[in-house]
Image (tube, helix red, strand yellow):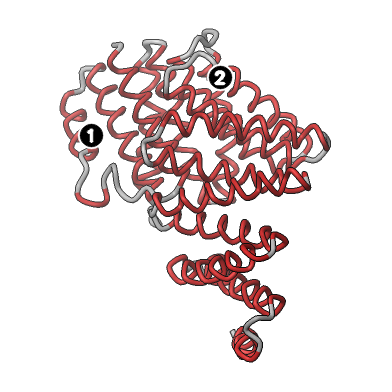
């Protein structure tokens, strides 16, 4: 902050000096990063990123060489606005950043990765705004771009990880629209993450996430019999030890258990679905540091538990589960969904449960 004050005084003495103003924008952006990542204060980070964008925009208007700084700060601004549940403003920033990176990548393909990041943010925000067709088109564009990036350096694990994540998001978008191409995208994501996890245990959680999605969506896709159940159960096995060392993954374990229950329901075996769904309810109920993700995971598990108990002719327990699942003010389903993972994964989990139960 003191360095920023010195720079500001320097810029006041030489307001026309583009170098001084660019340095000021860079330091203001650094202040935003400190607020966002060190202090976990997105509210304070937004004005810093916005000020940096304003300075960079003026500079880029005069000299295109300042466009990379503008694009970078637009992307940071969009990500921060999205975290604050301001999707309209976040989408505008993401789209402007994506357009800038597209022009920059024509001259320097090193900017392809940043363009993919901007497209993925635009996809996520479009999905939150209910613009499903737009989100799906952006997901397809992101996958195509990630493939091109991987081709340039196939051994780069970070690039392959990014491609797998893009395929996962595309698979989710296609599955939500009941599109048959969802399964190939999810299977390719599984193949890539399985290879990564085999080479490094650091990617085990990535693999478990993809397996959970396969487990959730197989009942609505043309999966081989038992494929979804095997995927969901493997996800549970991976998450169990990880959730002990990393408590934040407890909610992921609960989601994998719910996916397992969904698969048993698809196989018309509600008696086998009861144990995993009860464990999911217990895990989410025992969480002390609740998040939107954990609250929604619990609500979804409770709804499915109530339906399973009904099929098993346990009306008293079913009524209790249904009462617990009923939203109570801001803590219930539909609560703050500013987190991208919460918005996408929980909404489609609800959909899968609803469609599956309608088939019964």
Q: Of callouts 2 and 1, which one flags the residue occurring earlier in the amino acid sequence?
A: 2
In the image: residue 290, left or right of residue 169 = left
Task: Identify the residue position indicated by label 1 in the image.
Answer: 321
Task: Identify the residue position indicated by label 2 in the image.
Answer: 230
Closer to the camera, 89 or 11?
11
* Position in image of residue 9 (x %, y %): 61, 91
In the displayed structure, 281 sits above or below 215; it is below
Dot 2: element: helix
Closer to the camera, 27 or 248?
27
Mark number, residue 246: none
Dot 1: element: helix
Residue 61 visible in the picture = yes
Q: Residue at x 77, y 40 (%)?
A: 157
In the image: residue 202, left or right of residue 81 = right
* Position in image of residue 166 (x %, y %): 60, 34
Closer to the camera, 199 or 154?
154
Q: Residue at x 36, y 10 (%)?
A: 268
């Amino acid at each position: 902050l003191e360095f920023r004050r010195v720079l500001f005084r320097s810029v006041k003495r030489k307001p026309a000096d583009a170098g001084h103003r660019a340095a000021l924008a860079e330091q203001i952006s650094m202040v935003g990063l400190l607020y966002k990542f060190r202090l976990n204060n997105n509210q304070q980070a937004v004005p810093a990123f916005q000020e940096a964008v304003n300075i960079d925009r003026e500079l880029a208007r005069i000299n295109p060489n300042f466009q990379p700084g503008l694009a970078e700060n637009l992307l940071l601004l969009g990500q921060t606005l999205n975290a604050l549940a301001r999707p309209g403003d976040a989408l505008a920033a993401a789209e402007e950043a994506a357009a800038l990176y597209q022009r920059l990548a024509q001259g320097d393909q090193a900017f392809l990765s940043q363009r993919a990041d901007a497209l993925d943010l635009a996809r996520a925000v479009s999905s939150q705004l209910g613009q499903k067709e737009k989100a799906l088109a952006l997901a397809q564009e992101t996958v195509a771009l990630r493939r091109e990036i991987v081709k340039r350096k196939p051994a780069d694990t970070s690039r392959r990880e990014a491609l797998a994540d893009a395929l996962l998001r595309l698979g989710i978008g296609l599955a939500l629209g009941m599109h048959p191409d969802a399964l190939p995208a999810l299977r390719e994501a599984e193949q890539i993450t399985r290879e990564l996890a085999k080479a490094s245990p650091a990617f085990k959680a990535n693999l478990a996430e993809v397996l959970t999605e396969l487990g959730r969506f197989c009942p609505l896709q043309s999966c081989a019999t038992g494929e979804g159940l095997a995927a969901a159960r493997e996800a549970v096995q991976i998450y169990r030890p990880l959730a002990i060392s990393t408590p934040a993954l407890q909610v992921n374990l609960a989601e994998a258990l719910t996916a397992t229950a969904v698969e048993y329901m698809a196989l018309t075996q509600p008696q086998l679905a009861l144990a995993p769904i009860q464990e999911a309810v217990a895990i989410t109920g025992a969480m002390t540091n609740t998040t939107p993700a954990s609250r929604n995971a619990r609500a979804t598990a409770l709804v499915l538990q109530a339906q399973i108990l009904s099929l098993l002719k346990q009306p008293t327990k079913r009524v209790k589960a249904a009462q617990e699942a009923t939203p109570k003010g801001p803590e219930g389903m539909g609560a703050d969904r500013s987190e991208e993972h919460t918005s996408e994964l929980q909404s489609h989990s609800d959909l899968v449960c609803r469609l599956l139960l309608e088939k019964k």
